[in-house]
Amino acid sequence: MNAVAAKATNTDFVLAVEGLTVSFDGFKAVDDLSFYVDEKEIRVIIGPNGAGKTTVLDLICGRTKATSGSVKFRNKELTTLKEHEIVKAGVGRKFQNPSIYEDLTVFENLELCYPRGRNVFGALFFKRDAKVISKVREVAEMINLKDELESQADLLSHGQKQWLEIGMLLIQDPDLLMLDEPVAGMSVTERKQTAELLRRITNDRSVIVIEHDMQFVAEIADHVTVMHQGKILAEGSAEKVKQDPKVIEVYLGH
Amino acid sequence: MSNFSLKNMMTRQDVLGFLVLAILLLVIMPLSMDIIRLTQFGKYLSFAFVAVGLVLCWGYGGILSLGQGVFYGLGGYALAMFLKLEASSPENTAIQSTPGIPDFMDWNRITELPWFWEPFNSFTFSVLAILIVPTIFAYFIGFAMFKRRVGGVYFAIITQAISAILTILIIGQQGYTGGVNGITDLRTLLGWNIRSDYASYVFYFVCVALLFVCLFIAQFITKSKLGRILVAMRGQEDRVRFSGYDVANFKIFVFCVGAAFAAVGGAMFTLQEKFMSPSFVGIVPSIEMVIFCAVGGRLSILGAVYGAIVVNVAKTYFGESFPELWLFAMGALFIGVVLAFPDGLAGVYQKYCAPTVDRFLDKAPVFKRYSGDSSYSPSEPAKAS
């Protein structure tokens, strides 16, 4: 496909997606897709609506089962695992609409995602000890919600909900973080704060981001993958992709 | 900061609610009613076990089961089978063509005790069976449904079908189950006459004690992280998977707990009413149990107890005067509660009484150490109206 694909045999990648295909009643939402994400890389996926961006994340995190192809995370095949097993392997996913637990407080939301006591009896006898509390406080501080710990989550603003969901991922401490439009619907200030937050949290892990805001993309991306009709249209740095005539035609040109 | 201390498990409103209920059930009711009425009240309490289980399954877990009568019945039948065998000693049944087997088997020309009745000669086995048989049955139903991600209305319909099937099975296999009459004419428990007034008092207090055991277990579950996972699951089931939890296992667990509670309730019914019949297994009683829970408040374990009491008292008085109208009244009650008071009696208490009670508690020195944490809990006690 391009230069990256030539390194296919290399197993040093955090994530290796190869020949990934999913079809819904004959419609191929993702069609023979291959891409690789490096250690500590920030990969941004862009593309017009219906290109299959969100479906790719769904396939990686197990929400949708692939028709064929493979997804390897640190050389571990993910396509046969269940959602919670993929989470345990170290993949975290943030959804497009902020999906948080609205009936619970911010503290409880974060606590629930703390990676301990994940089976039935572990959860029943889970102890809220000093370690959990300090970790929750630390994450809350990072996502600007340390004064909201006791608020019920549905009372937060839209931007705060997005941050909370990012926080819920951070406390899981995943090696691969997948974010679906993290700044959608945010004000300019919130956007800036989020970009800053993302820069801080992406230091020690790999990240896949879906985003439309090209300015934001240019700010954070190491690599950009452009998708169109379930396939990869172009790949490279933000600058290079912006100049690509094909990309301009299907995506940027309007 | 331990999760297992009283303070973390109960807010002061919870403590007050438990105390009020304990005084009501242990002091006021026994002193104000004769033994016949008290036993009848004990029967209402046996339904409260089911309602408390439904608070966990339905209110917290979002799993609406319309088949709790199955577990209530299995628990009740397990005990009734033991008591029936004890009542069917060869001396007691000497006039039968086959002495030593339950009378209904003799009437159906069965000449030998069926194999699955044999273990119920043992008291220990029977007590274990009350808890274990319904729980295992719930586990299989839960495993088959929740692992396949069957939920919501589909699950409700399937549980309803199971309760219909079990009723048909019991009625159809008259020789093995006592048929539509159920298992009747129970006399002694380990040689002790269960029909005396003294025994009735003992059974009532055993029933209350076991109800409080279930209430404490339910309280512990709702206040644990598991309780919060259930609440999270109710709204955002998918998201819980991506927080690293196997959602099906949590549903199976809470469904099994609900089944075990219902089974204990069924056994308490058998003990106090001295019979068990398929009329407590089928679709109508199962739906009634959901109504007890809805009237009490889906999110309040104490509310469920009051819901079971209030609806049953109404059923007894109203149902005795206008038997043909009662089912309509019950339907109307259910619709009315869901529309006007979605949180049931507990919701009404929470809205109108709790603030006043809170102010009062602020002044009461006993509750001082609990101050300040009362607004935190989703499950608050309700008072009987």
Image: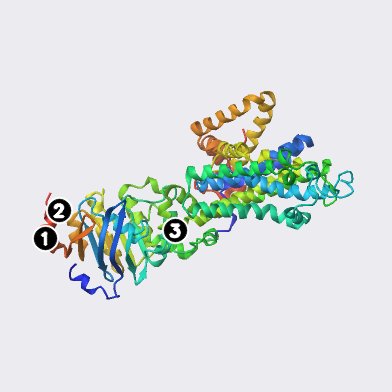
Badge 3 marks a residue whose secondary structure is helix
Q: Earlier in the sequence, mark 2 or mark 3?
A: 3
Q: Locate residue B141 relative to residue A254 in the image: left or right.
A: right
Residue B167 location, x and y as percent?
64, 41
Residue A247 location, x and y as percent?
14, 57
Q: Are marks 1 and 3 on the same chain?
A: yes
Q: Earlier in the sequence, mark 2 or mark 1?
A: 1
Front-lying residue, B204 or A159? B204
On residue A250, the disc is 2
The amino acid on which the numbered mark 1 sits, given as a three-letter code, is Asp
On residue A244, the disc is 1
Task: Tell me which chain the residue with mark 1 is part of.
Answer: A
> Distance of mark 2 from mark 3, alpha carbons?
43 Å
> Is disc 2 surrounded by few (<14), some (14 to 19) or many (20+) residues within 10 Å?
some
Residue A253 seen in render: yes
Residue B362 location, x and y as percent?
56, 44
> Distance of mark 1 from mark 3, alpha carbons?
45 Å
Task: Tell me which chain the residue with mark 2 is part of.
Answer: A
Front-lying residue, B16 or B255? B255
